[in-house]
Amino acid sequence: MRLFTAAQMREADRLTIAAGTSGRELMERAGAAVAEAVRRMGGGPVAVMCGPGNNGGDGFVAARLLAGHGTAVTVHLLGERQRLTGDAALAAADWTGPVHGASGGVRDCALIVDALFGTGLTRALDGEAAAVVEAINRSGLPVLAVDMPSGVDSDTGEVCGVAVRAARTVTFAGAKAGHFLLPGRTLRGQLHVVDIGIPGSVVAGLDSRLAVNGPETWQHALPSLEEDSHKYRRGHALVLSGPMTRTGAARLAARAALRVGSGLVTLGSPRSAVLVNAAHLTAIMLRPCDGAAELREILEDPRFSVVALGPGYGVGEATREAIRVAGASGRGLVLDADALTSFEGDLAGLASALGGAPAVLTPHGGEFERLTRGADGTRGVSKVERARAAAAHSGAVLVLKGADTVIAASDGRAAINAHASPYLATAGSGDVLTGLVAGLMAQGMPPYEAACAGVWLHGDAGLRLGPGLIAEDLPEIMPAALRGLADKP
């Protein structure tokens, strides 16, 4: 599913109107979709809360159509009727019933239609508008939002002061980023995208490089086995372990890389931790590796295809030097945790250390803030734009983790992940993600597709396991998750 900005949807409207479909006709179709959604939610009595713009016009159309089918409807307008303009004024003129003020519009009804602001909101709600939204939320009644819950920024998902909590949202032609970024995703309820006659060619022509992360984005690049496949063809991942007291994170990553299909996985371990690691490993191989010099020797073997570094590795110059060595080798790189913190406030230095190698960076919010401190474009914008900026600066794929993980490539492609479980918020979960991405890259999957697939599979494992999961469980559910993908048409 491609996602669009408010500006892109305004352009789609403009192009559609220029091609001969009037704005009034688009509003009629949008209002009809809202009325149908109300009927599916159980009908009236319904309070339709209209705003001063085109979102309010959609509400007037829906109210007229509902009343025409016998539904009890009251219409409430935020602002003065005589100040409506354009298509919204025409829609209001077609409504022959009374128009009440917005205050008090949540009484004597069973369902509320939020047609206050939609995607056109550009400032924080205050005054009467904020009071109306708060009253809607206090009512406890089910709410159907038109296009976007009022108060949610459609581009960022952020709340502009206050925002409506909807049970269902009907949007038109295409979903918006704010439907999938938090907190907007938690406020829009069930999302329904409705065709109102904007031509597919117009939508296809919009310069949207943002999508919801799903198999259709990356399944074409997912490694597959042939009858003559063998382990060396499936890639060899090298995961670097930290010192004796911090070895578990790397083992989690290594196990995940093996489970997701890497033909071989080697754990590079400091000699002080060899016995600890050896006691926990079976199919994963073990090789001593004390620092950058030995890493350089290991990578002289061309069979290693990717290096995962960071979980439990330690922060400092030794880590930075190991990344420089790995980057200079040209191998794929997956960097997390200590590898990123070692370049605190020096994203340019990390980009230099990568040396143009195909790389994926997987910071959580705190690591991202430390890494990108001072970097242009990584503050004061949406999560998608922050990730895109960091990807462009580093030349790597950036996975900005969280409940609404964003994956961004340096060429501007980006995806928002909604396929996940809150039960993934447990120690070691991120280390498993590092290993999943590394294991997919080891098999030849391009970094962006590997990152998207790793995030989705990680989320799928969390959804399958649910309450009680711990990080050690996640690699073991990979066979079921991968079989599930194979069953998809």
Image (cartoon, rainbow, N blue to C red):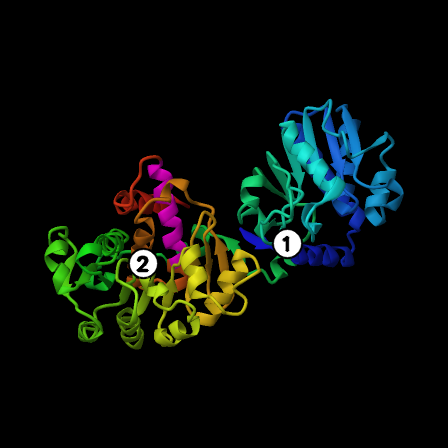
Q: Residues within 10 Å of mark 2 (few under 14, many from 20)?
A: many
Q: Is residue 202 above or below residue 295?
A: above
In the figure, is residue 455 to the left or right of 294? right
Tag in front: 1 or 2 = 2
Identify the residue at image location x=25%, y=54%: 249
Q: Mark 1 or mark 2, which has the lower sequence index?
A: 1
In the figure, is residue 340 to the left or right of 259? right
Q: Are marks 1 and 2 in contact (CB under 8 Å)?
A: no
- In this view, the residue farthest toward the right is 82
Region in magenta: 451-466
Q: Nearer the viewer, residue 470 or 464?
A: 470
Q: Is residue 306 in sight in this rendering?
A: yes
The answer to if 457 sits in the magenta stretch is yes
The answer to if 70 sits in the magenta stretch is no
Identify the residue at image location x=70%, y=48%: 197
Q: Which residue is mark 2?
A: 440
CA gap between label 1 and label 2 equals: 34 Å
Residue 264 percent across, percent down from the top left: 20, 60
Tag shown at residue 200:
1
Tag shown at residue 382:
none
Q: Quadrant of residue 351?
A: bottom left
Q: Main secondary structure of the magenta part?
A: helix
Residue 469 percent across, percent down from the top left: 31, 39
